Image: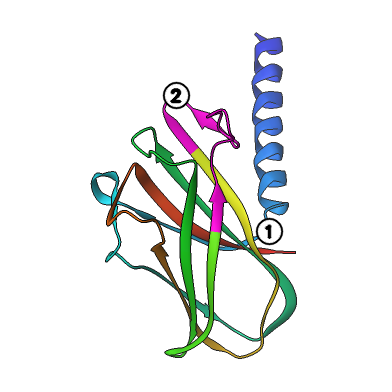
Amino acid sequence: MRAKFIIFILTIFIGYTIVRVSFINNNTIYSSFYEISNSNWSVVDTIVFDLKTTVVTNPHNLNLFGKINYDFSYSNLFVFINHYFEKEIIKKDTVLVPLFDNFGKPIQNNIGNTQFFNVDYLNNVNFTEEGVYKIELIHGMRENKLDGVEKIGIKLKKK
């Protein structure tokens, strides 16, 4: 009976320690995603993320992440990204997200028929003014409706 109690206490202590360490090493400042209804992303569906920031001079990294299924019939995903500060456009980008290699094998993690992607989009980002930064995502594929995209989001991490 005493041995079971000691094992129980040790298990709780180890679990607590693992959870604490995982939160200490987490450098994510902002993370948000948008679930695309019916996995059907239309070219007129603009996805908007609002980042309310203070002045930050330390460099940060901005990642683009998401999830697609096997209804997605392309090997890449093009995304148009517009950056705004207080309703004024400050940057426009086109990002290529490679999803499958030439043989149709997923480049990043997949589980069953779901393919996950995580792409470093911008490195060494500084927020020089306090306010609201807005990031818009629009798919840049040739189809008006893009089947198979389930989720897309952005993540801002400390460098």
Q: Which amino acid is tagged 1? A: Asn
Report the residue marked by disc 2: 112
Q: Which residue occupies the foreground of this view, 9 or 88?
A: 88
Label 2 Cα neighbours within 10 Å, binned few <14 / some 14-19 / many ≥20: few
Identify the residue at horizontal 58%, vertical 89% (top origin).
130
Query: What x and y, as percent, mark residue 91?
Result: 55, 81
* Quarter holding residue 16: top right
User: Element under label 2?
Assistant: loop
Q: Which residue occupies the foreground of this view, 9 or 93?
A: 93
Q: Residue 81 magenta-drawn? A: no
Q: Residue 110 magenta-drawn? A: yes
Instruction: Provide the residue span drawn in magenta.
Output: 96-115
Q: Which residue occupies the foreground of this view, 52 or 38?
A: 38
Q: Which amino acid is tagged 2? A: Gly
Is label 2 or label 1 in front? 2
Relative placement, left or right, of 122 versus 113 is right
Kindly identify which numbered label has been placed on residue 27.
Answer: 1
Q: Quadrant of the N terminus?
A: top right
Q: Is residue 84 above or below residue 153?
A: below
Q: CA distance from mark 2 to mark 1?
A: 29 Å
Identify the residue at horizontal 69%, vertical 37% (top origin).
18
Q: Is residue 21 above or below residue 132?
A: above
Query: What x and y, as percent, mark residue 156?
Result: 60, 64
The residue most toward the left is 38
Relative placement, left or right, of 150 versus 156 is left
